[in-house]
Amino acid sequence: MKNKAKATSFDIAHYAGVSQSTVSRALRNSPLVNDETKRRVHEIAEQLNYKVDKNASNLRTQQSSTLALLLFEDPTTDESQINPFFLSMLGSITRACAKEGYDLLISFQSSSSDWRADYEDSHRADGIILLGYGDYLDYQARLQELLDQDTKFVCWGATVDNHPDLTVSCDNYGGGQLAAQHLFALNRTDCAFIGDASNHSPEFFARYKGFKDAFEAQGVTLNDRKIANAISTEDSGYHATKSLIANNISFDALFAASDLIAIGAIRALLEAGINVPENVHVVGFDDIPAASYVSPTLTTVQQNTTLAGQMLVKNLLSLIKNEPVESTLLPPSLIVRGSTALK
Amino acid sequence: MKNKAKATSFDIAHYAGVSQSTVSRALRNSPLVNDETKRRVHEIAEQLNYKVDKNASNLRTQQSSTLALLLFEDPTTDESQINPFFLSMLGSITRACAKEGYDLLISFQSSSSDWRADYEDSHRADGIILLGYGDYLDYQARLQELLDQDTKFVCWGATVDNHPDLTVSCDNYGGGQLAAQHLFALNRTDCAFIGDASNHSPEFFARYKGFKDAFEAQGVTLNDRKIANAISTEDSGYHATKSLIANNISFDALFAASDLIAIGAIRALLEAGINVPENVHVVGFDDIPAASYVSPTLTTVQQNTTLAGQMLVKNLLSLIKNEPVESTLLPPSLIVRGSTALK
DNA sequence: CAGTTAATTTTGCACGTTAACTGTCGTAAA
DNA sequence: TTTACGACAGTTAACGTGCAAAATTAACTG
């Protein structure tokens, strides 16, 4: 039978015949406590099923051993749907936090205007991880505000002006190059791009830039007309591709700024009777799980989400400890699948 | 310029010329405080950018306004991959929590043996949501333990012995019926089932049972030989289907216990030169995002994850408030797509 | 105008922990 | 023998809230 009232450190002190503060020290393995006493305290703590009260501990130490994850979704995305790429990141961030002894608090784009107040000031979290795609311009002002407040935070993808160290991101430019080199090697040089070639979405732009530059390095110039804008959803990729087709724009390869776009693009192509990969090779970006389920399976530039999550957490913890943080750029890798492989 | 030191309720009390406890009440809109005083306190709080310290507040009230979500993955699942169905649930649970003013703490299958101690005793969370697929038998003992400890928790899917009220689940049996009725209407009665027809995974079993019973109600008896076991991964579905084919077992329709299995099954079928839906109709379960990306798009029994998440949170909060909780069974709905639709 | 009641506000403590400061005792150096 | 110091353990004071009881003020009655 368990006690209804939860055991406190005083209870342990009582049973162990020592003072409460000795219990506290013993449980945190302070060197100021005799080993034998430590052992006894630990034993009794176990028996009483004692757990340090997080609230009391946090209140006293003025920190929470918790990180907050703020997830920004594309505004058009349907409520229940979350971008699978971010979900993958979520998984690795959760694990990285657990490994470091931190809890993870998750929240979607907060309607509140003051992230710092919501998390740091209220001592709910020691730091914030911002995870989002695309339109960071809207947030630059806010990020600057966080900086001014000396808030501890790291971003995925978005570079904060003059503070690249606060960002962990994939080498999108290099990833675009990988895609281009792959297509070039397959002799597919008449390429379309679906994503966002403006500077509106820095990540998509970098992918495009790397793609374009790599082709130009081979003496191939891409036709700007073969670009269609899309946000990172299947639907958007589908419609963008459809409009390319409708405009009679020809191409023998297609580079999509994300896998979801690529999947939508393939659907549009197949519907139009254009075979993948025979007529058009398709390369995506991200390597979400669905990339290996669709048919044809999708060749894509893989982002290492496991490493990305670990780095985000690691860098944030360094920030919190006021340690120097270095800029982090993760190398992507090309995963060749059916959409660029002729049998 | 913000103060480095965070404002406390004492600071507000000082500026407002009242006592700290009046501030506390004023901020929580207690009727015991004069309206004018309230207004002034709120104003000053805003100016100082004051936020209630969660830790102090939680310590005082002995609760955390936080729920913990424990996610159980299939043991075979790769580390970074999370079952997309659960991710969808995660999204709606997060939102439901936010709406109720609760934070959500996420954790993957804890290696710790004592969930209650990890969350409730340490006051990190007021209650626990258990989310998992399949093999609950391993956990029944643990669930019983949680019950004995009077821990506040709710489960997805798994029924705790004699406590159906602690479970929110989809009407898996009814979903199986839906699938059967659909296939029967299309005159596909020679059905295979891939999943788990033993009682090992209660959810899969219920889906199979409903499927089988609905056919029998129409006078059609399913052949037990046309069953292959699989866990909820694409790979497992692929191999299970392959083994059916390898054993020369014929069928004109296939019901998979989950979409991931169905997607793997389709891959195996197509590889074997069996057309979907012409030769074999395929019906899945869950309606994960990928179901509408694969080709052919997948007909499936949809679980309402939005509602499920809301109910889990709602029921858990009721439990925490010691209010009576009712058993919750959510109705699934059939989504007809390409894998059962002949052009 | 003293006396009673209602409407507010204030005082003081408790929540469970950690950390800084004190205190004790035995042993080694002076 | 005295002093000093290390190795422990105990005492006390926050951390910032929220609640109960006490205290103050205002409002009203006879």
Image (cartoon, coloured by chain):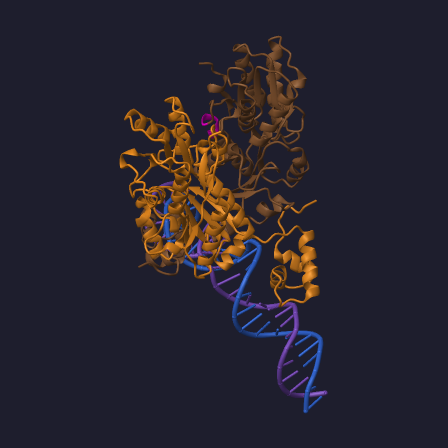
Chain colours: A brown, B orange, C purple, D blue
A88 or A20, which lies in front?
A88
As drawn, A327 above or below B169: above
Report whether residue A71 is seen. yes
- Residue visible at 66% across and 57% down in the picture: B12
Residue B189 magenta-drawn? no
Q: Main secondary structure of the magenta part?
A: helix
Q: Which residues are magenta?
A: A289-293
User: Along the line of sight, which residue is nearer the eye, B332 or B68?
Assistant: B332
Question: Relative to A224, does residue B320 appear above or below in the rendering?
Answer: below
Left or right of A213? Residue B331 is left
**Total labels drawn:** 0
Residue situated in front as seen by the camera: D13 or B189: B189
Query: Which percent across, then down, holds residue A301?
Result: 52, 22
Question: Residue B213 location, x and y as percent?
Answer: 33, 45
Q: Quadrant of residue A219?
A: top right
Q: Residue at x 30, y 42 (%)?
A: B200
Q: Quadrant of the N terminus of chain B?
A: top right
Q: Is residue B99 depicted above or below A250 in this figure? A: below
User: Which residue is located at x 29 percent, y 41 percent?
Assistant: B198
**Horizontal arrangement in the rendering, residue B72 relative to residue A177 (left or right):** left
Residue D26: x percent and y percent? 71, 75
What percent of the width, then of the height, locates residue B302?
Answer: 46, 41
Q: Specify whether residue A291 is painted magenta.
A: yes
Q: Quadrant of residue B275?
A: top left
Can residue A41 be seen at all in this image of the molecule?
A: no
